[in-house]
Image (cartoon, rainbow, N blue to C red):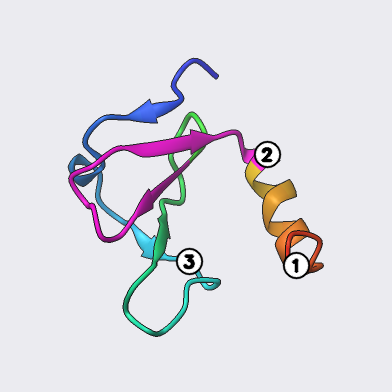
Amino acid sequence: MTEHTIPDASLLVGWRKSTYSGNEGGSCVEVLDGYPSGVPVRDSKAPHGPALVFSVAGWSSFVTAVKASDLRH
């Protein structure tokens, strides 16, 4: 994978709020499904800011760890 960031994430459509983001309206992580070179992730408070692009395997491992509570204190 050669692309690690997207400078202006607002240029892409189809963002969805992560199911692990809280409902408080503050900190929300958004992901974009179906992106050809990985899984873009952005901060919903900065829609015109950058998005990080993770490999599908890396993102899947991260989500699995969160679901298993491996990353919580």
Amino acid of disc 1: His
* Residue with the mark numbered 3: 18
Is 22 contained in the magenta span?
A: no
Amino acid type of disc 3? Ser
Q: Please state the horizontal and vertical placement of residue 34, each as a whole percent of the image.
A: 46, 45
**Lower position in the chain sequence, tag 1 or tag 2:** 2
In the picture, the disc for residue 73 is 1
Q: Residue at 23%, 52% (x, y): give it.
A: 46
**Tag 2 residue:** 58
Q: Mark 2 Cα within 10 Å, few/some/many (few <14, many 20+)?
A: few
Residue range (magenta): 40-58
In the displayed structure image, the side of residue 39 where residue 49 appears, left or right: left
Give the number of the mark in front: 1 or 3: 1
Q: How far apart, in angstroms, are the residues tagged by discs 2 and 3?
A: 16 Å
- Label 3 neighbourhood size at 10 Å, few (<14), some (14-19), many (20+)? few
Check disc 1 and report its element: helix, strand or loop: loop
Say whether disc 1 or disc 3 marks the residue closer to the N-terminus: 3
Q: Secondary structure at mark 2?
A: helix
Q: What amino acid is at disc 2? A: Gly
| In the image, farthest residue toward the top | 2
User: Which residue occupies 55% across, 19% down?
Assistant: 1
Q: CA distance from mark 1 to mark 2?
A: 21 Å
In the rendered picture of this protein, how many numbered marks are placed on residues?
A: 3
Front of the two marks 1 and 2: 1
